[in-house]
Image: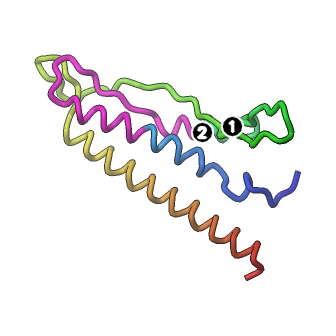
Amino acid sequence: MSALGFQNSLGIHQKALLVRAERTEVLANNLANADTPGFKARDIDFEAVLRGEVDKNASLAVKRTNNRHIAGRGSVDFELLYRSPYQPAIDGNTVDDNVEHAEFTKNAMSYNASFEFLNGRFLGLRSALRGE
């Protein structure tokens, strides 16, 4: 196995980007249901998912049955957790606007950071291929 591979160059950031995108959907769903009686806020434990992905990083290969098949995108398994409310509403809704907006903003910033990191890696790989 070569130390200079596409997978080695990108590291865990491509999987982090997938989880951040999924988490964005979950948090947006929470915000959309802030006024829905009985709605339970959910979230993804990003650190736990990423820790698990680091542990099984080598086992994410997609099985190809033909040499002409393109390697597929690995998926990331995660469990949606319920958020424990600081102050639940009388109607059973557990969405706290302040918490959801803060988590959404932090997740968006982390998503952009991972995206910029990957973009920098691709620019570096492109420069290396061109011999610049």
Q: Name the residue under label 2.
A: 51
Screen quadrant of the C terminus: bottom right
Q: Residue at x 65, y 40 (%)?
A: 73
Q: How far across and how far down the image is residue 13, in percent? A: 59, 51
The quadrant in which residue 51 appears is top right
Look at the image and give the residue range highlighted in magenta.
Answer: 23-51
Q: The residue under label 2 is which amino acid type? A: Arg
Q: Determine contact: label 1, label 2, CB under 8 Å.
A: yes
Asked if residue 6 lies in the magenta stretch, the reply is: no
The quadrant in which residue 85 appears is top left
- Which class describes the residues within 10 Å of circle 1: few (<14), some (14-19), or many (20+)? few
Q: How far across and how far down the image is residue 99, in percent? A: 25, 40
Q: Which residue ends up furthest to the left in the rendered image?
A: 90
Tell me the SS state at disc 1.
helix
Q: The residue under label 1 is which amino acid type? A: Asp
Mark 1 and mark 2: span between their CA atoms? 6 Å
Q: Which mark is residue 66?
A: none
Q: Which residue ends up furthest to the bottom in the rendered image?
A: 132
- Which class describes the residues within 10 Å of circle 2: few (<14), some (14-19), or many (20+)? few
Asked if residue 29 lies in the magenta stretch, the reply is: yes
Q: Is residue 66 shown above or below 119? A: above
> Colour scheme used in the picture?
rainbow
Q: Is residue 126 shown above or below 4? A: below
Q: Which mark is residue 55?
A: 1
